[in-house]
Amino acid sequence: MTHPLDALKGKMPYLPPDMLIDRYSFTGDILSYGRCSKQYGKFKYYGFSKALPIQAWFGDVVHMTIELLFRQVKGDIKDSLNSISSGTLPSDDDVEFHATESMNILKSKGMFGRKADREFVLELLKVFNLKEGLSFYKRIIKSEVRLETIISPSTGNRPYIMNGIIDVLASPTPGVIEIWDYKAMVKPPSGDPKLTSLENQMYNYVEIVQSLFPKYTITTAVLYFINELGPKGTGNPVHKIDLTSSTVSTCITAARDDANDVVEEIRKAKLTGTFPDPPKGSVDVKTCDACEWRWHCTSASKTYTLHAP
Ligand code: SF4
């Protein structure tokens, strides 16, 4: 059976002028394409809008609120009592105040969370604030660090710009940097491909951070899975990667090669207008559960039935 979208294939050509260099975000392109090439094609390339970007909303609330809490501790912005309270641990009211502000900003951009999601994320943020506490905020030397670099693959393929954002650069001791990235999800088990992809994200960022902060030694990458702080979580949200290990340069090279391969796949898909359908069952069920394509997708990992609201 032909799909209605088949008629569009190849008719939205990707023809960047020769002098332009294409750019890719690690999370928005490399990870996203790796999660599901078909979903990436539909939403990122063909531009179908997502009706319920709840995962993005959740992650944005987490990132924005922690950033505001850090700025409150730094003394840059006021707390829930309209005072400057630098150097003190934010209260639960402060967490709620900043989380509400974050949600209102997202609302103004058309991104909403359901009541249950709003309550859940707020509880997670309160636990985060108490658990990591003042010592965490005080270790932060920079947050929301934008990274951008030109990658020239050793295979001779065309260079591209890789960009990304590091949530936090923390300095536990002078001269040392840790890279922190919050993930609004539960921690995947060791060896799970999802965890490997996230580790590869960190490996891809290490050299860029090192070039920006040449006087520091980057010792650790921390993936912080905030959903582990919820009632069903393990209470252990941290996954650490030792960047002083002797195998680290091999991991960095392998991660960079993987990213280069994905970029080539994306380029090929854009040129032909065809984004491969993943084999049925190969995409993570949670990704399909949140995908608007799931009811009629032949690659979906389970069968979805349409219900009247
Ligand atoms: S339903 Fe699943 S397999 Fe199909 S496009 Fe969406 S994420 Fe991909």
Image (cartoon, grey):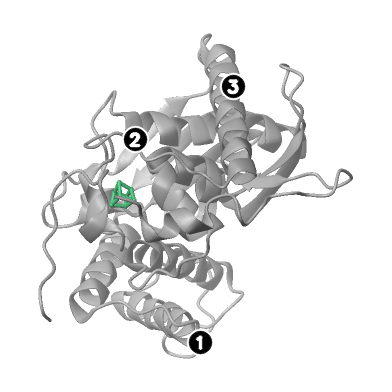
Q: Is mark 2 on a helix, strand or loop?
A: helix
Residue 78 seen in the figure: yes
The quadrant in which residue 125 appears is bottom left
* Closer to us: 149 or 221: 149
Across and down, in percent, residue 164 comes to: 61, 48
Query: Is residue 114 rendered to the left or right of residue 271?
Result: left
Residue carrying label 1: 83
Query: Is residue 185 rendered to the left or right of residue 111?
Result: left
- Give yes or no for contact between labels 3 and 1 (Cβ–Cβ under 8 Å): no
On-image quarter of the C terminus: bottom left
Residue carrying label 3: 257
Name which residue lies at 34% across and 55% down. 184
User: Identity of the amino acid at label 2?
Assistant: Lys
The quadrant in which residue 289 appears is bottom left
* Closer to us: 308 or 34: 308
Query: Is residue 204 rendered to the left or right of residue 57?
Result: right
Across and down, in percent, residue 73 comes to: 51, 68
Q: Is mark 3 on a helix, strand or loop?
A: helix
Q: How far apart are marks 3 and 1 (CA)?
A: 50 Å
* Closer to us: 107 or 261: 261
Q: Which residue lies furthest to the right in this view?
A: 19
Q: Distance between the residues labelled 2 and 3?
A: 17 Å
Q: Is mark 1 on a helix, strand or loop?
A: loop
Q: Which label is found at residue 194?
A: 2
Name which residue lies at 18% across and 75% down. 116
Across and down, in percent, residue 191 comes to: 29, 23
Across and down, in percent, residue 214 comes to: 76, 32
Name which residue lies at 64% across and 42% down. 271
User: Identity of the amino acid at label 3?
Assistant: Asp
Q: How far apart are marks 2 and 1 (CA)?
A: 42 Å
Q: Earlier in the sequence, mark 3 or mark 1?
A: 1
